[in-house]
Image (spheres, rainbow, N blue to C red):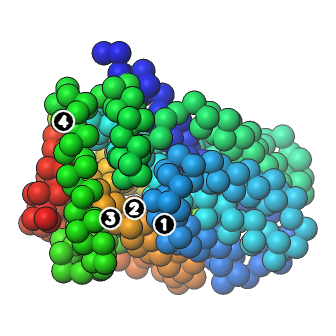
Amino acid sequence: MKSRPTLILSAIVAALGGFLFGFDTAVISGTTNWLVDFFQLSKATLGFTVASAIIGTVAGSLIVGKPADLIGRRNVLFILALLYLLSALGSSMANNWTMFLIYRFLGGIAVGGSSVVAPMYIAEITPARLRGRMVAVVQVNIVSGMLIAYLSNYFIASMELGQVEWRWMFGVEAIPAFLFFVLLFFIPLSPRWLIAKGKESQAALVLEKCGTDNGNVEDEIAEIRSSLDMETDHRREWFLSAKFKKPILLAMTIAIFNQLSGINAVLYYAPHIFRMAGAGSNSALLQSVAIGSTFVVFTVLALTVIDRFGRKKLMIIGSLGYIISLAVTAWAFYTYGTDFSQAGGKVVLISILIFVASHSFGQGTVIWVFISEVFPNRVRAKGQALGSFTHWFMAAAISWTFPIIADISGGHTFAFYAICMVGQLIWVIFVMPETKGLSLEEIQKKMGIK
C-alpha cells in the first residue's frame, strides 16, 4: 500500500513523545538516593520530589486540549518537545531543590501533554483496521523509553561518577528530546483537525497518504464533516453533560484502575522496592533493567494482537495477572517483613516481573488506545485531556504516598492494589465495551451520541 510509509512514519514520530514520556517517568528511579543526600530530603519530601513531575502531568493534561484544537495536534507536539529539552537540561544543572522541582514540573507538563496529544493524533490519521496497533505504538515507545532510562541509569552508575551521577542521568534525555523536535517537521497535520478548520483539500492529501476506512477519500471526508457539523449545531453544549456521560465514565474508570494497580509506584520506586526485598544498590538497578525489558517484550506482543483479540480480552488477561502477582508480592512482604532471605527476594522479583508483564499486555497497551477511541470527534481533545488528567491525578496520589505507606507495611500496600484489580476485572467483564474494528465515527454511534 502506498499509504503505509507515511502512516508508519507519522505514528512512530508522534510516538516519540511517548518515548520521552517513558524515559522521564523512569529516570528518576535511579536518582532517589542521590537526591535525598544532595537536597537533604525526608521520606515525605522525597515523595513530593518524585510527584513534582506527576503534578506537572496533571497540569499538562488539563491545559493541552484547547491548544490542540486551536493550533493543531502536531504543532502542540513541537512545544512539548521543547519542554522536554528544557526539563532535561534544567534538571541536570539545578543547584537547589526549588529549581529542580520547577524543571521536573515542566517535564511533567510535557509528559501530560504527550499522553493526550500523541494518541489523539495517531488515532486521527489511522484507518480503523490498524488503529489499535498504531496507537499502541505510543505505549511501545513509552516502555522503550523506560527501558533506555533504566539501562542509562545502570551504565552511568557503573561509571562511578560520584555526586554528578544523578545530573548525567537526567541530562541524557536532552538527546532524544532534540531528535523528537527535528523529526516533527516531517509528519503531516491531522486530517480531522484540518477538516474542522475548513482545509479539506489539505486533509484529502493526508488521507490519500495515510489511508481511509472505506478506500474513498471523498466519502471519508463527508463522514468526518458530518460528525464535526454537530459541533456547529451544538456549539454551546457542555462537555460534562449527560450526552457524553458514557465515554466520560469509561475514560475516567479505566484511568483510575490503571493507577490503582500500583504501576507508577513500581516504576518510580523499583530500586527502592527491590532494596526493601534485600537487594543491594547495583543489583536493584539491574533488576530495574529486567522490569524495562519485560515492559518492552509484552507491550510488543500486545501490539501484534490488539486488533485481532480486541481490547477487552487483553484487559481480562492482564487483570488476572495483576491479581495473582500482587497477591504473591503482598504475601512475600507479610512473610519476610524487613528480613528478606535470598529466596524471598527472588519471589518479589519474579512476581513484580509478572505484574509488569500483565500491565504491559493489558492496561498499559489498552488505556491510551481506548481513551483515544471512545469520544466523538468534536470533543476528543477534551475527552483525551480528561482521561489523561484522571490518570495523572491518580499517579500523583499513588507516587506521593508510596514511600510513606510502604514504610509502614509493604504487605498492606500490595494487598490493597490486588483488591483494586479484582474491581477492575469485574468492570471489564460487565461494563467495558469492545471497540476493535470500528471507525471513530462508528464508535460515536455505538455510544449513542448524536
Q: Are marks 3 and 1 in contact (CB under 8 Å)?
A: no
- CA distance separating discs 2 and 4: 24 Å
Q: Do the residues labelled 3 and 2 touch (CB within 8 Å)?
A: yes
What label sits on residue 381 in the rendered view?
2
In what element is the residue under mark 2?
Answer: helix
- CA distance separating discs 2 and 1: 7 Å
- CA distance separating discs 3 and 1: 10 Å
Assess disc 1: are there few (<14), some (14-19) or many (≥20) residues with their C-alpha within 10 Å of its C-alpha. few
Q: Name the residue under label 4.
A: 219
Kind of residue at badge 1: Lys
Q: In which quarter of the image is residue 159?
A: top right
Q: Are marks 2 and 1 in contact (CB under 8 Å)?
A: yes
Q: Are marks 2 and 4 in contact (CB under 8 Å)?
A: no
Question: On the rendered image, what quadrant is the N terminus found in?
Answer: top left
Indicate the position of residue 115 as horizontal and vertical percent values. 48, 56
Assess disc 3: are there few (<14), some (14-19) or many (≥20) residues with their C-alpha within 10 Å of its C-alpha. some
> 331 left or right of 61?
left
Kind of residue at badge 2: Ala
> 425 left or right of 240?
left
Q: Name the residue under label 1.
A: 66
Kind of residue at badge 4: Asp
Assess disc 4: are there few (<14), some (14-19) or many (≥20) residues with their C-alpha within 10 Å of its C-alpha. few
Q: Name the residue under label 3.
A: 379
Pick whichever of labels 4 and 3 is earlier in the sequence: 4
What label sits on residue 120 in the rendered view?
none
- CA distance separating discs 4 and 3: 22 Å
Indicate the position of residue 29 as horizontal and vertical percent values. 64, 58
Say if 30 sits above or below 151 in the image.
below
In what element is the residue under mark 4?
Answer: helix
